[in-house]
Amino acid sequence: MITVAESAELRLRSAAFPKESIGVRMGVRSSGCSGLAYVLEFCYDSNSDDTVIFCCDDTVSIFVDVKSMIHLTGTRLEYVKKGLNEGFEFVNPNVSDECGCGESFYVNK
């Protein structure tokens, strides 16, 4: 299961969603030197095999496709402020290696 930290819930609750969106899509894609990168974007349609996670008092839907769920099970989504930088952070216990710049990761499954 994927969990959403209170910090991420507060940020999602205050986000300006496009009227056409039905929530947020969370996933992974092939990228970078380590193989996978996280994706978090507005979602405009769902697939029959999506897992739907509700947060923010069930007002925000997070959609995760079946292929991404394999890599994201156990992940906690947080919103972190570090100095002048802020953004969503994926705390994923499945990661076995990351690239030096932090853009991509590898899961040994």
Image (cartoon, rainbow, N blue to C red):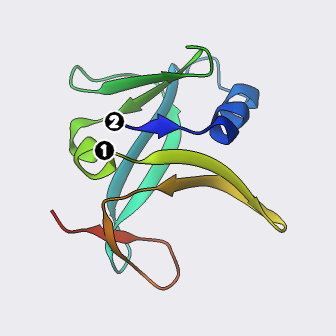
Residue at 21 percent across and 25 percent down: it is: 49
Amino acid at the residue labelled 2: Met
Residue at 66 percent across and 35 percent down: it is: 6
Amino acid at the residue labelled 1: Thr
In the image, residue 92 above or below residue 51? below
Query: Can you identify the residue that label 1 sits on?
Result: 73
Helix, strand or loop at label 2? It is loop
Residue 29 falls left or right of residue 44:
left
Helix, strand or loop at label 1? It is loop
Compare marks 1 and 2 and give the one earlier in the sequence.
2
Residue 16 or residue 59, whichever sits in front: 59
Query: Can you identify the residue that label 2 sits on?
Result: 1
Q: Position of residue 36 (x, y in %)?
A: 33, 65
Look at the image and tell me in which quarter the C terminus lies. Answer: bottom left
Residue at 40 percent across and 38 percent down: it is: 2
| Disc 1 + disc 2, Cβ < 8 Å | yes
In the image, residue 82 above or below residue 88? below
